[in-house]
Image (cartoon, grey):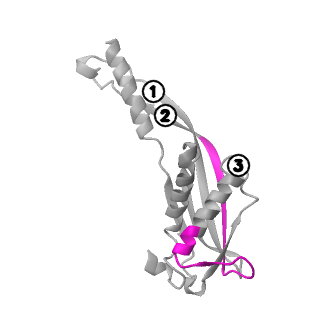
Amino acid sequence: MKIKAIIASLFVAGTMVACAPAVTVKYDYDPKVNVRQFATYRIEADRQRNADPIVGSNLNQRRIADALDVSLKGKGYKPVQEGEADLIVRFFTDSKDRQQIQSNNTMGPWGWGWGGWGMPNQVYSRNYEENRVVVNVYDARTNDIIWQGWATGQLNSRRDRERDAAFRETVTAIVKNLPESAGQDYGASR
């Protein structure tokens, strides 16, 4: 009986790791904006909102800015170092502590468990940090937000050598939903 409880515990622990929240990407935009008028951009960290000391660190801000720059160039936009840009791309990060609760639910309605033996229902919890990267795209002339993309998941839990890739992949997934190139409207990119 004890071996069955150990196996059940290992199964539930493995299931919890496999069910760890993945990075989820979403976006929103203003459908009235004609994107064909935009060709250039400038990237800025939103200094007021990057309050998280880890995910919002200067190191991670550089990772995000570099990934945004590569992604936007890949879409046909051109960076502007000096002078007026058509788009201002601002980003910020934040984090929240979360808890995941899972039950092995081995106790059936008639008391049957593994091999016909009833086992008590075991509940497991896992605490983790959920991170969010938000990219806001503004019309530089009006300062109105015209597009927003965000990703939510566990970015900071990666090992050091995987962290660069995690941020790069996350930002690429966010920007993927931005129109393909300057001069293309939203309807054609969806």
Q: Which residue is mark 2?
A: 101
Residue lying at the far top in this picture: please name it: 1
How many residues crowd mark 1 within 10 Å: few (<14), some (14–19), many (20+)?
few
Image coordinates for residue 146, horizontal then vertical, percent: 61, 75
Q: Residue at x 68, y 46 (%)?
A: 54
53 shown above or below 138: above
Q: Find the distance from the CA under tag 3 to the CA under tag 2.
A: 25 Å
Quadrant where the image shows the C terminus: bottom left
Which amino acid, by three-letter code, is at mark 2? Answer: Ile
Image coordinates for residue 68, horizontal then vertical, percent: 59, 66
152 shown above or below 157: below
Q: Quadrant of residue 6?
A: top left
123 shown above or below 75: above
Image coordinates for residue 89, horizontal then vertical, percent: 65, 70
For the question of whether residue 63 can be seen, the reply is: yes
- Numbered range of the magenta stretch: 70-97
How many residues crowd mark 3 within 10 Å: few (<14), some (14–19), many (20+)?
some
Q: Quadrant of residue 171?
A: bottom right
Q: Which residue is mark 3?
A: 52
Kindly indicate whether the residue at mark 1 contacts the one at mark 2 (C-beta within 8 angstroms).
yes
Residue 6 is a magenta residue: no
Q: Nearer the viewer, residue 187 or 57?
A: 57
